[in-house]
Image (cartoon, rainbow, N blue to C red):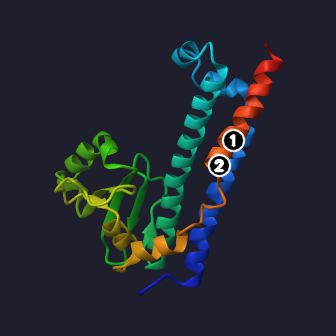
Amino acid sequence: MTDFQNDTEKSLLSIIDNLLKETTSKASQLSLFKLVNYNKSIMMELFSQNIDEYLYFMITQYITTSFSAGLKKAIVTFSEILVKSQDGQIQTNPEPYDLKFKLKSGEEYWLEIKSVNELYCSTFPTIKECRLHPENGNRKYRLFVYDDGDSPYDEECQLNGKEFWKLIAGFENAESEIFKTINGAANKLSLSSIIQGTQKRLLNEWRMHE
């Protein structure tokens, strides 16, 4: 397999499209009540004399956090498709990990997925510890960091970028094929416009209750 088949590309683009729609939908469903209860202590006090800035900060945090969580979910979903494309088996209920699968070769992987290297510390020690237990057999524990380049850590159990996608897809240039497929896929989404539109809507709602 040297590149993605047409149906694989369509699946990836569909997953990204759903992520964009979900981000827009969550913003439209965000209520003033939900936002205030999302953080109603320190931030409210800090911005008590400037509700515009309070709403901007909280809405930005809510939407970008939601988008990041959705992106991680999208990566897991697409990873499952790629594993199956090379006749691998996905294990259901992977918690507390994000992805568990067995390749056709018989190798079994349990993966935790993070966005940047700095977030690895909560899980990495556990992953390293699990490798030392003989009852785990040939199971391989790995950490994938999807938004950083090469790992700054010389650790076998951490996969960054192209090494992860090579494992998941089963061919060398998988990462470049993925990047080529999704290039510009989010151009139609304007997070700044969504944030500003939601801020205007909730500010009007706030003033109605003053």
Q: Is 107 on the left or on the right of 81, as rendered? A: left
Residue 30 seen from this side:
no
Q: Nearer the viewer, residue 202 or 10?
A: 202
Residue 117 lies, in percent from the top left, at 31, 49
**Number of residues whose C-alpha sits closer than 10 Å to that of mark 1, classed few (under 14), some (14–19) or many (20 or more):** some
Q: Nearer the viewer, residue 181 or 22?
A: 181
Residue 57 lies, in percent from the top left, at 57, 30
Q: What residue is rendered at 40% in x and 59% in y?
A: 100
Which disc, if any, is residue 142? none
SS class of the residue under badge 2? Answer: helix
Q: Nearer the viewer, residue 178 or 200?
A: 200
Quadrant of the rendered structure where residue 50 is? top right
Q: CA distance from mark 1 to mark 2?
A: 6 Å
Q: Is residue 207 above or below residue 108?
A: above
- The three-letter code of the residue at mark 2 reads Thr
**Number of residues whose C-alpha sits closer than 10 Å to that of mark 2, classed few (under 14), some (14–19) or many (20 or more):** many
Number of marks in the rendered image = 2
- Tags 1 and 2 touching, CB below 8 Å: yes
Quadrant where the image shows the N terminus = bottom left
Q: What residue is rendered at 51% in x and 66% in y?
A: 78
Residue 62 lies, in percent from the top left, at 58, 36
Q: Which residue is mark 1?
A: 27
SS class of the residue under badge 1? Answer: helix
Q: Residue furthest right?
A: 208
- The three-letter code of the residue at mark 1 reads Ala
Q: Which residue is mark 2?
A: 23
Q: Is 118 on the left or on the right of 17, as rendered? A: left
Residue 18 lies, in percent from the top left, at 65, 59
Q: Is 98 on the left or on the right of 62, as rendered? A: left
